[in-house]
Amino acid sequence: MLPIKIYLCKMLENKDKSSTSLSELGEFGLIKHLTQNFKCNQTSTIKGVGDDAAVISTNKQVLISNDLLVEGVHFDLSYMPLKHLGYKAVMVNLSDIYAMNGTATQITVSIAVSNRFPLEALEELYDGIYLACKNYKVDLVGGDTTSSTKGLLLSINSIGEVDKEDIVYRSNAKPNDLLVVSGDLGAAYLGLQVLEREKQVFEVNPNSQPDLTNYSYLVERQLKPEARKDIIELLKTLEVKPTAMIDISDGLSSEILHICEQSKVGCNLYEEKLPLDPQVISACEEFELNSTTIALSGGEDYELLFTIAQEDFKKIKGNPNFTVIGHITEPNEGASLITRANQKIKLTAQGWNALKND
Amino acid sequence: MLPIKIYLCKMLENKDKSSTSLSELGEFGLIKHLTQNFKCNQTSTIKGVGDDAAVISTNKQVLISNDLLVEGVHFDLSYMPLKHLGYKAVMVNLSDIYAMNGTATQITVSIAVSNRFPLEALEELYDGIYLACKNYKVDLVGGDTTSSTKGLLLSINSIGEVDKEDIVYRSNAKPNDLLVVSGDLGAAYLGLQVLEREKQVFEVNPNSQPDLTNYSYLVERQLKPEARKDIIELLKTLEVKPTAMIDISDGLSSEILHICEQSKVGCNLYEEKLPLDPQVISACEEFELNSTTIALSGGEDYELLFTIAQEDFKKIKGNPNFTVIGHITEPNEGASLITRANQKIKLTAQGWNALKND
């Protein structure tokens, strides 16, 4: 695991004079330098970095997903170390492949970067990308590198493969299926709140040393999430094929609504079933936040949400990796939250909106 | 063909009051709205927009390429209409697939956009993307939409397929092979110079009406390039398989050097053979530029540069689509330009550097 350190400083502006400007290398020199340690190990990778396009050969179906990560919108470099950013950016993308019940095999990484970033900053970023590729056994096979007029932008593609009969879409959930989630919810959002608070403390007193002992899980979930490759493998071992699946990036309620809409079904979600880490509960008390709201709308959990047929329940029963949080209903029942007080509330997507007005 | 109009105005700031803000739709509403008219026609497209990943099925090898286009770096919206930008962004990406001798089949389009863009601006952008998809028979199968802190950024993937035995890399050019280019060179760069000049005139006198009659070809090459799908098809008809191929995005000399480096060969390029449109020659005179320099380093031509075995010469001889501009030599001879005065000059890459200091 990467050590979690909080850089509550404008690290990039504090670089010493020995830093190397990107323009010294030029675009092709830069790509070559940053990718020189990456080796292709997947048998499906025929050609990686270095030609007009990457070449992939597989007899399975090919999965392709893309995510953009924009500085100032998706991440704040005052507390997100670049190595963690590189790692997380890959996780966010691999998560989409696992959500199709696929195996991630390749990524491409494109960056737009302003000249305020020295080469050493990009090396840190690529160290994180390298670690992610190594841990998840994916090959870096291409990308683009250009300048930006402001800040850093990452565009990552994840490429995967899956047997036709194994693929899981969002659109096949059926009434009476169980609604299941891996891991726990809300921690990444609270980690962000903790880091934002420490940033404000730091801006008032630059000598302050944050004590994050009580928030270690929250901060790790924010700075170094893991895509749930292990869950896909576990489901295979347990011989459970979900009927529908999605990864939780925008918040549980938003993802449930995607499944309901695309499968043309309703659902009942039970508040008391929501899996919460003890640090989530204590941080919610401290920040005076409702833990159910955070679990439903926090986002960035990168857990898997899926539905399974009732007859598969015995295969996952008691497994600590899974929590049954509800069940699918007929479409006319709509998507509802059943509260602890047994009230039925219409589920709404209040997840993160990347297009909101600031 | 799209009509070429020069919008020498800050079109986005002149929008009338009826414009729609992006935040009104939200991310998913926006994606749905912008992609609603796109239909998937490729048999290899199993699932397009709307799940965690696109799903593609082919028994050929899969090609994947990515390009970033950044406002203020790659395009200037004061004279680049958004519809043209959308069209060009797709062309830039498809060009990479054709450069592998492949067939482009799908694209994904991700955009980061600041809130100064109304919905109507993105509709124009997607109109251009739609037209490109229609003309080149590619499916839009995915992407991401988010906000940016400044300007517009496009990240496009092109996906293609190719039979294993048809694929052409940069790395297989052999001594005595002929160096061939499609179309002509330098026009796109000069089109940019014309547009930049008109922008300056406009800034001094906003009522000026530019007369671009004498520059129509140059401006069209800059604002609406076409990827050379037709050349790939023509080569197939002529039964010519290039030994190496690359598309000309950064300038001829830069691309020749990529082929020489990756094929471990040298080359002689003949100045007198460089294909130049009459408008290129007259504009070079007017701007007091050396036409050879422009052809070598202008960039954005999106023509194909390739090498063929000597015995294939008879198949392309006299074909107006092709110009033989030189030949491949032993590696120790290096890459050289042979001038009209029969001087031998070392070829250097002075193409566009996206990472230069401004």
Image (spheres, coloured by chain):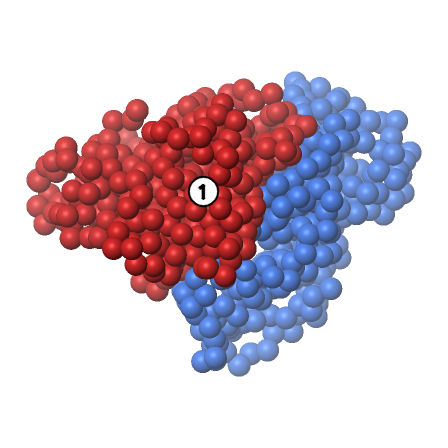
Chain colours: A blue, B red
A289 or A120: which is nearer to us? A120
- Figure disc tally: 1
Q: Residue at x 35, y 64 (%)?
A: B357
State left or right for residue A283 relative to residue B190: right
Query: Where, quadrant-wise, is the C terminus of chain B in this rendering?
Result: bottom left
| Residue B49 picture location, percent across and down | 56, 30
Label 1 sits on a secondary structure element that is: strand
A311 lies above or below B215: above
Q: Residue at x 47, y 75 (%)?
A: A19
Q: Identify the residue position indicated by label 1 in the image.
A: B178
A208 or B226: which is nearer to us? B226
| Residue A157 picture location, percent across and down | 58, 44
State left or right for residue A214 relative to residue B254: right
A75 lies above or below B55: below
Evaluate whether residue B48 shows in this view.
yes
Image quarter of residue B273? top left
B205 lies above or below B167: below
Q: Residue at x 56, y 66 (%)?
A: A123
Image quarter of residue A37? bottom right
